[in-house]
Amino acid sequence: MDPGLEKEQTKLERGTKCCKSCIIFYILCIINVTAPVDGFSLKTCRISYSTAICIGSKLRAVPGDIPSTVTGLDLSSNRISIIHASDFKDLLNLTWLDLNINNISQIESDAFAGLSSLETLNLNNNKLVTLGENVFDGLNRLTELRINRNRIKQVASTSFKSMTSLKLLDISHNKLHHITKLQLILQHLPHLRELVISNNDLTTFQSFELTNKSLELQYLDLSKNPLAVFRITADVFPNLTWFKIGSPARKKQMIWDVQNKTFLSRVTTLDISELHLGLGDMERLLESVNSSLTILRMNAMTHNLTALINISCTIPTMRTLQLRSNKLSFVNAYLFKLCINVTELDLTDNKIKYIHDDAFKSLKNLRILTLSKNRLPLVPAATRNLPTLSELDLSTNNISTLDCHDFTNQTKLRKLYLYQNSITALKPCLFKDLKGLETLKLQTNQITKLNGAFKEHLPKLRYLYLNINKLTAIKKDEFKGLHSLQNLSLDQNQIEILDHKSFVGLTNLTRLHLQRNSIKQDKLQKGIFNPLIKLRTLDLSENHINYNESRNLPDPPFSQLSHLEELLVFSQHHRLHSYLPVNFLQGLTNLLSFKARNIRIASLDKDTFVYTPQLQLLELSSNELKELPPDLFFPIPNLKSLYISRTALYSLDFLIDANLTKLEFLQARQNLYSVIRKEDIQFLPALTYLDLQGNGFTCNCDNSWFLSWAINDSKTQVYDAYNFTCNYPQEFKSKKLLDFDTRFCSVDMGFICFLCTTCAILCLMVVSFTYHFMRLHLVYAYYLFIAWFFDKKHKNKKTPLQYDAFISYNTHDEPWVIDKLLPKLEGEQGWRLCLHHRDFEPGRPIIDNITDAIYGSRKTICVISRKYLESEWCSREIQAASFRLFDEQTDVLILVFMEEIPSYLLSPYHRMRKMLKKKTYLSWPRAGEHTELFWEKLCQALETREDPEAKTLLLTVPTMP
């Protein structure tokens, strides 16, 4: 192989390896992309636990931006009037849909066709008049349909055709008028279990008009229909266990015709409230359920109440008797004498003022007695004769005093409700017999003193409600006897004084409510909460707790509450700025939730939360914090929810270094920032919900990233983003932020950097390859440019010719020029020649001398050798002369080769090769001993015209191939 080719091949292989390395580096640059935190926003809804909530948004149509992944959709309380066929087509995963309280009057065909997973549909409180053909097509998995309180008059025969899985249908409060319309519905519902058709203006109910076969119904509600006739001629309800019938609108007695008393023999719950039926028919009705009835409701009965009670109490299986709203102002000793099997009696809302002492004497098995919403002035003595009573409800009466004997012998009582009365004080002996009491409700009274009522006697009490009273102090050992108490509600009193032993004995207490009192910070010291070693929730909100400085407290109030999980201290009543002591939370090692909104703190020490490493929810809203130091959050890396609304924050930059990698919920409403930067969000990788309502945003390119992120991405929900408004600049004020057009500022610096880097890499690769394979061509191009530049400078000038020829040669060839060329042409022939060392003007730039010499001579003689081609100045001289030859079309160039030069060495000099292919040249080595011929040819060349089209001289030396 030729050595030159071998060398070129080696260079090519090296270049290929370099190319591969560059390509690999380029690919790595492309794939090195950081995944962003995603975000999204719905125009009128919000997403919570896979449910889209659009309640009360004044919608007139179903939103089109509901994510297809939701399983629940709540569109209640809107103004939707038409359900279109395309409204739910993409919600394939929807299992429940709530359209309650709208203006829906029309449902297009196939509107629900795409909801193949839907199980529950609520269309209550709308304006539907007609259920058209196949209106519910596609709902073959629906199990519950509620369509009450509409105006339905007509039902098509195929409306319910596809609802073969339906188990509950509530079509009450409509205008069906006739039972035959129900037949069109029930024929397609083989698995229906519950049917509610109350208040439909039905005047007759006859089984043969409804169906001719047995139904699987277990629950049937026919109440509030003015039925004149109720007739069952066949056993169409063999599984019915719950039956309700009766209407206040019916003034005349209804005809009851059940031809076989076994037709209703499985009914266990019967509600005949407001039923107007003759006593004989009523006896037959109750007789038909004589063997199965356990619960009977006879509310608001207008006739024969005493007789009905006597009849019903003869049913041996009946256990629960409800007699609400029957205007029983007095309960005599005989009213319930036959109710020996009753275990639950409800006499709510009867305006009862007096109960005979023996009124319940025969109710030996009574366990639950409800006397709420009456006018009792005292605890009736009749309740003392109920040794099995476990629940007594005396709420909402006129009871003002409680005596020690009121609950005598109530050893099995578990629940006692005395709330919403006028009780002013308790007595120490009041609960002495209630050894088994677990729940005591005394809220909403006027109790001012406890008088030691809880120091003993209630060893099993677990829930005590004393809220909304007039207590001003909790004295020492006030709850000492409540060792089992778990929940104590003392909220909404007037408590100012707490003794350091107020809660002694409450070793099992888990929830303590002290909100809305007048407690001050000094009452929290002296270890007041130390006995509450199992406390989980403590509510001290809306009191008067206020600290004047943030220095450490000598006795932190919660130091012994290591099990506390929730602490609420929000909304303290004071006017001046407050502080939170650095060790306020000391001891709360398991605290999960801390709510401290509106306590007028202006700053927080960075060590505030060092005692609460498990904190997951932090609420600091409505405090003038203005800024939050990032290191404040360092001790709470598990934080999931953060509320910082109305805190006068100027930016969210603290999130960058706060290390809140688990934060899922951020509410930051009504602050002072106007720009949300990418850096503020990207450091919250777990964020799923962002609430920024009420901020005045800047509508310019600073928010372009936030706008795009809020609308388009799909991980973080930006709540109510479509209602964000602009506050600046003035021309955009009060306009919607998301209406701002960001197209003109969609400059992605990351993408630009990517493009610049890519272009730089590609340019580097091109330059490397070019230099590696074509560096000689580049050198030639450089000299060519210089020659072109000077040619442009001189070609329009009419320079006078001073010389016959300019001699361009390398210093290595100078002896030949001086010794042979110069004597021959100047000495013998008389030609005037221009030489570097002799004729160049001293002090002028070399390039100017060269240019003037070439353009001031008729010809340029280039003495070419290998050294000549390697010379920088010689290359410039030949390029300038070649420009005159090719660009001016002037024959000025004479080439004289001093040695044989291979063609490949001339390859970078494209113009020289082009010249040699068109013109002859002189070769000194080939002249040999015939030098005279060489000089003769050279003289002829000097004498030829400058027209390049003139006939070329025939030299003895042949042209180069």
Image (spheres, rainbow, N blue to C red):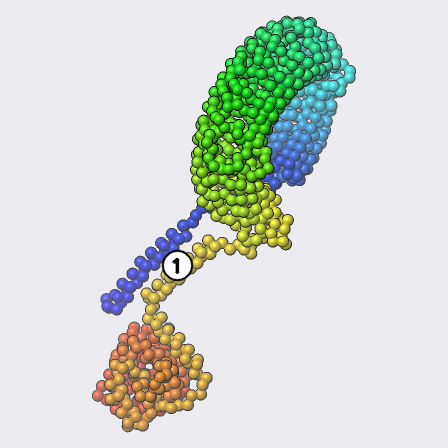
* Residue under pointer 1: 761
Front position in the image: 557 or 516: 557
Up the image or down, 319 lies above or below 13; here it is above
What element does badge 1 sit on?
Answer: helix
The quadrant holding residue 471 is top right
Residue type beneath disc 1? Ile
- Residue 374 % position (x, y): 69, 16
Residue at 52% x, 47% y is: 651
User: Please, is residue 78 above or below residue 712 in the view?
Assistant: above
> Foreground: 486 or 327?
486
Residue at the left extreme of this rendering: 929
Disc 1 packing (10 Å; few <14; some 14–19; many ≥20): some
- Where is 533 relative to 43, above or below? above
Give the residue at x 58% y 21%.
465
Does residue 715 show up? no
Residue drawn at point x = 33 percent, y = 69 percent: 775
- Where residue 384 appears, as percent x and y from the top left, is 61, 7
Q: Quadrant of residue 952?
A: bottom left
